[in-house]
Image: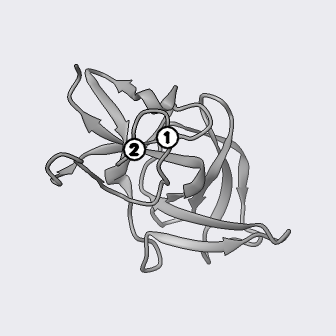
Amino acid sequence: SAGAGIRKGRKVFREEGQKPGKRAPGAAAEARDAEGGAACRGVYACRACGAFVAPADAAIPVSGAHLHTFFNPLGFVYAIGCFAAAPGLSLQGGPDASFSWFPGFAWTVALCASCLAHLGWSYSAPGKTGFFGLILDRLVLMEEKSPG
């Protein structure tokens, strides 16, 4: 299960501040080591399947903030975090500029590459650096721990 940690190379990632089997909200961009309080690198994983989605250090500000809350045309509210990279995603369809939360950027639906859960959107614009807006309650922040 995702609570038991995921392996990436020789490193094991555990959920921030949680015992195995529990899930932490995906709002922090940096995990904290529970024993010493020192910062440690981590990753965001898909809450549905536990697959790697993005490194925690890929969190970036867009339009002055990392965290944003928006609603779509159907009235669904999303709390999203902005990321420079999210290699664990698969994009579905082409860019759409209608009802974009970020003026000048078109969005493309972004799914977990492993289980195809909807995790957010990729934002792109000609001549501008693209980014990802990830739905934070669909992610789990896993902190890096030494194996064994």
Q: Relative to 92, does residue 99 appear above or below in the rendering?
A: below
Compare residues 76 and 123 and report the one nearer the observer.
76
Q: Which quarter of the figure is the C terminus placed in?
A: top left
Return the residue at label 2.
Answer: 18
Q: Position of residue 9 (x, y in %)?
A: 30, 22
Q: Which residue is drawn at 40% across and 29% down?
A: 5
Q: Tell me the tag on residue 36.
A: none
Quadrant in which residue 54 is drawn: top left
- The residue pinned by badge 1 equals 22
The residue lying at 66 percent from left, 73 percent from top is 70
At label 2, which amino acid type do we have? Gln
Work out whether residue 77 or residue 66 is closer to the camera in this orientation and state it: 77
Number of numbered discs present? 2
Secondary structure at badge 2 equals: loop
Residues under labels 2 and 1: Cα distance? 6 Å
Please give left or right for residue 6 compared with residue 100 in the image: left
Could you tell me if the residues under marks 2 and 1 are in contact, i.e. CB atoms within 8 Å? Answer: yes
Q: Can residue 101 be seen in this view?
A: no
Secondary structure under tag 1 reads: loop
Res. 121 visible in picture:
yes
- Amino acid type of disc 1? Lys
**Circle 2 residues within 10 Å: few <14, some 14–19, many ≥20:** some
Residue at 60%, 32% (x, y): give it.
113
